Image (tube, grey):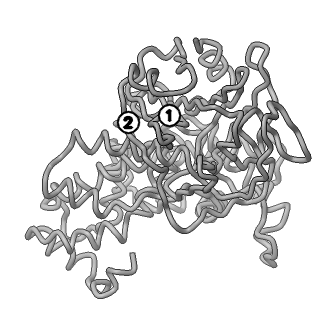
Amino acid sequence: MSRLDEATELTDAAAVDRARGGDLAAYELLVARYTVPAHRAAVLLGAGDDADDVVQEALVKAYRQLSRLRGESGFRPWLLAIVANETRNLHRSRRRRDGLVLRAAARPDPEPDSPDPADSVLARERRHRLVEHLRRLADRDREVLVCRFLLDLSEHETAAALGVPKGTVKSRTARALAKLREHLLVEGVPGA
Amino acid sequence: MPDRYDEDLVAELRELEAWLVTPEPADQRAAVRDRLVRGTRRRRRIRATVAAVVAALAGTVVAVAPARAAVLDAVGDLLRVAGIVVQRDAGPTALPATPSPLPSLRTATLAEAQRLARFPVKLPAGLGEPEMVVLADPDPAGAPRVVTLVYRGGKVRFDQFDGTLDIGFFKKSGTGQWTEIGSAVAIWVPDPHPVTYVGRDGVERTSTARLAGPTLVWADGLRSYRLEGFSTLAEAREVAESVR
């Protein structure tokens, strides 16, 4: 995406402004900037092999709904909310969701010559367990944790992404964290 | 408010994000612009599916010594069924930098595929009618080396090819395991993994578009089969056993 170098000084807000006026090159800058995080969000929310389709659908929808993007919210969380919505639509249209992606996608081995203590065998085992238990949570509990803490969306943005009231996001987050903690403790893992 | 939460666990979750590996996304710039300019919703879906099929047949390049006519072979960490090899390599896999598609990919009708292929094109009865039939890597007379049947909007793919000539696919996975389909030897690869397609011309073709999902590979006499898109061995086996 290096060919867009000349445009990289354009801020998201400026690009959104221009795109609203029909400037497709400006929108393409946003597409280039946010395809990777959007794809990652789709995969983490269980879109599996359909992640690329979800991302494309979300990018097209986002352009058509740009007028609804309020001044104070950024393009990234707004786009990720649309991605989350699209992923949920996908789940409605098929029986099984790819929640397994998390487990399978956890890195199996440390980087060969990493001196990082976060890369120790113990830390890796802990992460594996965390992913495993995250995967076993009910879909709606996992979704809220993925949105809030892995994708770093605010409560408000998570509410929009999951199509539930903000209060529900709050209570569901607390409940999902408690369940996750309980599962980790039951397995005999010392608390972090 | 955040201070009501289990902050240690929240910190752990935030940190976890960096440790999760997801497949390479496709570059969406051209496709999105195309749709915004022309509004080609339906055509896009078909093109996206074709692209997914191309990607399913491609992956990381690994050097493979041609081993002819062996139907079954297990040397060191290689599992082999006819034309498909699984390398049990648990190390992290680096994807190549340049996407490059399979040669001469085209869609066809089932009847056309059955007429052109030099092997009997079989159907998994359990999946019903294929939504799309794709022919790849034809010889000079137009006979495809690989026939792919696509089901469930591209989610399930069934590849078949003549595996007695050369290795056609090379898969890298830490989790490949032996199993059986009826009396045939099979390999089940449950985790996402890169796949190499070794062409008729011996050229290994690669794509960064995606990793293959859970896959069952097996051989029936001289033909090799590859079924991708089921998360459990039981589901995949059921479909594989319905191939007629």
Residue B237 sits in quarter: top right
Q: Tell me the tag on residue A97.
A: 1
- Identify which residue is drawn at 35% across, 49% down: A161
| Residue that extends furthest to the front in the rendered view of this protein | B141
Q: Residues within 10 Å of mark 1 (few under 14, many from 20)?
A: some
Residue at image point 45% right, 14% down:
B128
Give the residue drawn at x 49%, y 17%: B127
Q: Secondary structure at mark 1?
A: loop
Residue type beneath disc 2: Leu
Which residue sits at x=28%, y=73%? A29
* Residue nearer the viewer, B102 or A43: B102
Say what secondary structure mark 2 lies in: helix
Separation of disc 2 and disc 1 at Cα? 9 Å
Q: In what quadrant of the picture does the C terminus of chain A appear?
A: bottom right
Q: Is residue A165 visible?
A: yes
User: Residue B149 vs residue B204: left or right?
Assistant: left
Mark 1 residue type: Arg
Q: Above or below — where is B55 with respect to A13?
A: above
Specify whether A105 is left or right of B114.
right
Chain containing mark 1: A
Q: Chain of mark 2?
A: A
CB within 8 Å, label 2 to label 1:
yes
What x and y, as percent, mark residue B45? Answer: 30, 41
Few, some or many residues within 10 Å of mark 2 (<14, 14–19, 20+):
some
Please provide percent x and percent y for residue B92: 72, 60
Q: Nearer the viewer, residue B93 or A120?
A: B93
User: Do marks 2 and 1 share a subunit?
Assistant: yes
Image quarter in which the N terminus of chain A is found: bottom left
Q: Which residue is mark 2?
A: A90
